Amino acid sequence: MSDHYFSAQPASPDERRTINVPLAGRTRAVQVAPGVFSAERIDQGTSVLLQHAPLPPSDGTFLDIGCGWGPIALSLALHSPDAAVWAVDVNERARDLTHMNAISLGCNHIHVAAPDDVPGDVRFDVIWSNPPIRVGKDVLHDLMSTWLPRLARGGSAYLVVQRNLGSDSLQRWLVDQGHATERFTSVRGFRILRVAAAA
C-alpha cells in the first residue's frame, strides 16, 4: 500500500538515508525517508521558494507549514540563527527527520511540533510554506484559515503553489477570505503568493 506524505503515521518502512542538498548557500547532508514529502531531493516548488522569497529578518518567530524532512525550516534557521523557527507537520516521521536534521546542522532554535501542539498565543513574523495542495481544497483551506490569522502585525506569508495545481484559485480564495494576497513572483510554472498580516 502506498503512503501519502500527509499520513500521520506512514506505513512504509522507515528506511533512512543521507543525501546532500543545497541549503542557505551551502551543500549540507540531511536524512530523508520514504513516507515523507519529496524524500529524494528538494522538490521544485520548495526550491523556487527558497531561491526567490525575500530573505527572512535576522530574528523573530517563523513558521514552516508542512515541514516534511525540513528544507524550509532548516533554511530559515540557517539564515536567521537568532530567530525561533516552528516546523509543523501532521506526519510524525517528517517531524522526527526535521528534528534530527536540525540537530545535525546545529539549528537548536527549531521547534518541531504537530499542529495541535503549537501554543495558541504564538504569532509569526514570517510564514514560508509549500502547502500540501493534494490534500484537497477543504483541508487546504482549513490549513490556511488556521495559520494565516496568526501572522504578527507587519508579518508576511510566502506560499509556493504550482500554477497547474490551482495557485490562482487559491489566491482568489485568500482574497475572498479577507487576506491581502498578491502574486510575488512566477518561476518555472510556480507562483509565490505573498499574504500580508491583517491590519
Image: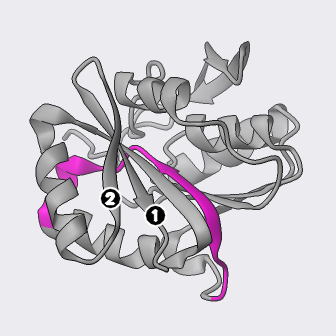
Q: Earlier in the sequence, mark 2 or mark 1?
A: 2
Answer with left or right where residue 38 lies relative to residue 155. Answer: left
Helix, strand or loop at label 1? It is strand
Magenta stretch encompasses residue 52: no
Question: In this view, which residue lies farthest toward the bottom?
Answer: 121
Displayed quadrant of residue 114: bottom right
Residue 33 screen position, x and y as percent = 50, 31
- Say which residue label 1 marks: 196
Q: Which mark is residue 14?
A: none
- The answer to whether 149 is drawn above or below residue 56 in the figure is below
Closest to the observer, 15 or 195: 195
Q: Amino acid at mark 1?
A: Ala
Separation (CA) of disc 2 from disc 1 = 7 Å
Residue 129 screen position, x and y as percent = 45, 48
Q: Which mark is residue 181?
A: 2
Span colored in magenta: 121-137
